[in-house]
Amino acid sequence: MLQRNVFLKGLYNKKAAENQRLLENVLKEIVGVKQSLFRVFYLWFFLNAVHQHGV
């Protein structure tokens, strides 16, 4: 019984570590997407301002 619990705990810890890694990857992706969206927005905003003012 004890051996089984140790095995299950090890399995659980491994799964938790995998989930943690997946979550971190997803968060990195989201942050990356957000950053590129901001970049696109700022570029568009800048070009729009330049175009309107004819700088």
Image (cartoon, rainbow, N blue to C red):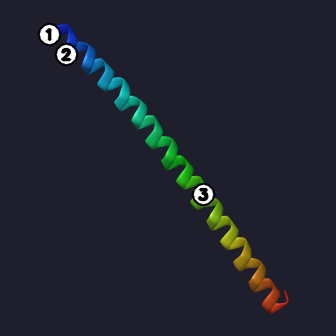
Residue 8 located left or right of residue 44: left
Mark 1 in CB contact with mark 3 (< 8 angstroms):
no
Q: Residue at x 73, y 76 (%)?
A: 44
Choose top left, top right, bottom left or bottom right for residue 19.
top left
> Closer to the observer: label 1 or label 3?
1
Q: Amino acid at mark 2?
A: Asn
Residue 4, quarter of picture: top left
> Which amino acid type is marked by label 1?
Met
Return the x and y of residue 45 as percentages of the image width and height: 70, 79
Earlier residue among tags 1 and 3: 1
Amino acid carrying label 3: it is: Val
Pointer 1: what residue?
1
- The tag on residue 33 is 3
Q: Position of residue 49 (x, y in %)?
A: 75, 85
Question: Going 19% across and 16% down the picture, which residue do you hit?
Answer: 5
- Residue placed farthest to the right in the image? 54
Does the residue at mark 2 contact the one at mark 3 (Cβ under 8 Å)?
no
Disc 2 and disc 3: Cα gap in Å? 41 Å
Q: Quadrant of the N terminus?
A: top left
Residue where numbered disc 2 is placed: 5
Q: Is residue 2 left or right of residue 35?
A: left
Q: Secondary structure at mark 2?
A: helix
Q: Secondary structure at mark 3?
A: helix
Mark 2 vs mark 1, CA separation in Å: 6 Å
> Which of these two is toward me, 27 or 48?
27
Q: In the picture shown, does residue 43 fall above or below 7?
A: below
Contact (CB < 8 A) between labels 2 and 1?
Answer: yes
